[in-house]
Image (spheres, grey):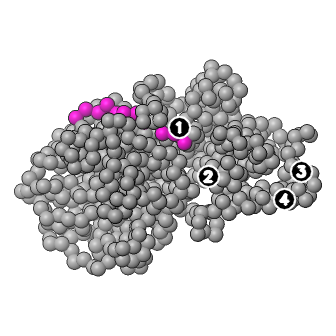
Amino acid sequence: MTFQEFAAARLPAVLAFAAVLTGQRATAEDIAQEVLIRAYARWDTIGGLDRPEFYVRKMVLNEFLSWRRRSWRLIPAGDAATAAAAEITSDHADEYAERTALLAEIGKLPRRQRAVLVLRYYEDRSDAEIAALLGCRPATVRAHAARALAALRVEMGPPGSLTSYRESEIR
Amino acid sequence: MRTERDLRLALREFEREAPDAEQVLRQVAERTSAGTATRGRRPGRRVLAGSAAAAAVVAIAILATLVAVRPAGHGRAAAPDTTQSVPRYYMALVPANAQLYAKTGESGESYAVVKDRVTGRTVATVRPPRPYITFIGVTGAADDRTFVLTAQSTTAGSLTQRNKFFYARFSPADASVTLTPLALRGLPVSNDYLSAALSPDGTKLAVASEIGLAQIKVYSLPGGAAKTWSAHVNTPFAFANNIVNLLSWSRTGTLAFGWVGSIPGNTAGVYLLNTNSAGGSLLVHSRDVFCPPESLPTGSYIGSNTAYLTPDGTTIISTVPNPIPIGQRPPACTQTSLPRRATMPELEEFSVRTGQATSVLYASGSHGAAASDVYWSNPSGSVLVVESKLKPGVTSPTAFGILSGSTFTPIPGSSSPPLIPQLAF
């Protein structure tokens, strides 16, 4: 896959992933820029992978997790997450209030916890996959998820309530 | 206490913060050409050539990708702001024999695809699992990841066909769809089945069926507990003839359905069913909002009869041959048909509370195109996904697109391959 093909087909999804991870357009842009510059420079290698997008997403994830360690990129003081959430509007009053509160609380989570939630509930990845991406054990992933869900007061659904299988397995 | 579903929906809200691809690529190119690409990076991890000439080459190459990310025929990739609220992914049905469909309109056997509204690309394909050979319907929750597909074991028209519902969960991470058969009891068979609608939170599936007994069942998912509302009818058709917009949910659990009527008596209209009731008589537990303007007197109904309830439950969007003046109610269904203009029908909004017209959404006279079915609406009904003819005239090709105010924006890739007009956002 060429870089052009990647940009045309997969870049919007990668940018959406960056936005969900960060919750802020400006930060997502910064992270995307950094990642794309590095990815482009190494595209001979990345483009030859089975799923280049996965590799770029991993780069986005790593960039997000290491973001705060760089002083020149520190997010300005203030409730940035709340401000970002406030811009996300819905004209359904009750849901708007609840959703806004939840968005703000997600923004306050430690980055690793937030990353776990995004990978599990936005990307629909298994705990084993998340562990591989974060370089930790699945038990650690579950611990992060449990703490995050408790902080957000999210009740987990019954496990195994649906017997799912991949569409490719039943063709 | 919040649920995992609340969390999924909340995370999806952050997608609205996604930067524009073209803008990001421009910024990358500018930084590269300005030699700032390595700003802040640790020594030894510089990734770009140090020379200005090399940086310029990289910048030019990245700028070249801008062509790739722009939709065809558009100067810029950025869509109008109003389109941002439309879900990114949608599921649609595709006829297996596209040529036959184009020639005759007969869909025959169909499969499902997940499409990216922004890029127009098909990102996943779903074939019906055997013994089912075709999908005949699709409906979606509000998260644009959860869908329900209706599969049949034989082609339409057979009296022995079996219907089966499948949860279809789309994962954008690996562009896969996970199908889960739903063990629902008492499903309508053969042509008794008309339409199904998944509630916005994905926890309830409403199924309409008729032939002798008009019935709406609401199944709780995934368990399958059902409540049933029914009405005996003597007319050949009791529900409205628009299977796409036959059923629509509000977020508060109200289910709207179009009703042609029954004999004796004239009961035609758009009804709101209180699905929190225990079940029983369909019309007793429903409230008649108004008679849709395209209906004819009982027993002689024709027309598409769109009746789409907005998610906030305040507005019905209906197809009208002529706009009803704002503030007025449509004529009663006991009158004969309304005079038709030579133009295509238009869309108009009506208040659920009063039944009065509140706004004309799409006027064929001014826009030269016709909207019929409504496939998605934002909570208030100010932004819709509809199907429309691109030009005046019956032979004009149609396209699915976003209707906001007076602007219709076709969705890229929604006409190729041809999609059966059953889309779920």
Q: Chain of mark 1?
A: B
Q: Nearer the viewer, residue A73 or B236?
A: B236
User: Where does residue A115 sit, x and y in percent of width and height?
Assistant: 65, 35
Left or right, A124 with reference to A4 = left
Q: Earlier in the sequence, mark 3 or mark 1?
A: 1
Q: Which residue is mark 1?
A: B7
Do callouts 1 and 4 mark residues in contact (Cβ within 8 Å)? Answer: no
Which residue in the structure is indicated by mark 4? B57
Q: Chain of mark 4?
A: B
- Specify whether disc 3 shares its chain with disc 4: yes
For marks 1 and 2, give the one nearer the viewer. 2
Magenta-drawn stretch contains B222: no
Q: Which residue is mark 2?
A: A9
Contact flag, marks 1 and 2 (Cβ < 8 Å): no
Q: Secondary structure at mark 3?
A: loop
- Identify the residue under disc 3: B49
Amino acid type indicated by mark 1: Leu
Which numbered disc flags the more N-terminal residue, 3 or 4? 3
Give the class, few, some or many, for how many residues have Cα within 10 Å of label 4's Cα (few <14, many ≥20).
some
Look at label 3 and name its amino acid.
Ala
* For residue B67, above or below residue A126: below
Magenta residues, start to end: B175-186
Q: Secondary structure at mark 4?
A: helix
- Circle 3 crowding by C-alpha within 10 Å: few under 14, some 14–19, many from 20: some
- Residue at image position (42%, 59%) is B418
User: Is B372 in front, or is B192?
Assistant: B192
The reply to whether dot 3 and dot 2 touch (C-beta < 8 Å) is no
Residue lying at 54% horizontally and 31% vertically, measured from the top left:
A153
Q: Are marks 4 and 2 on the same chain?
A: no
Residue A156 at x, y = what percent? 49, 27
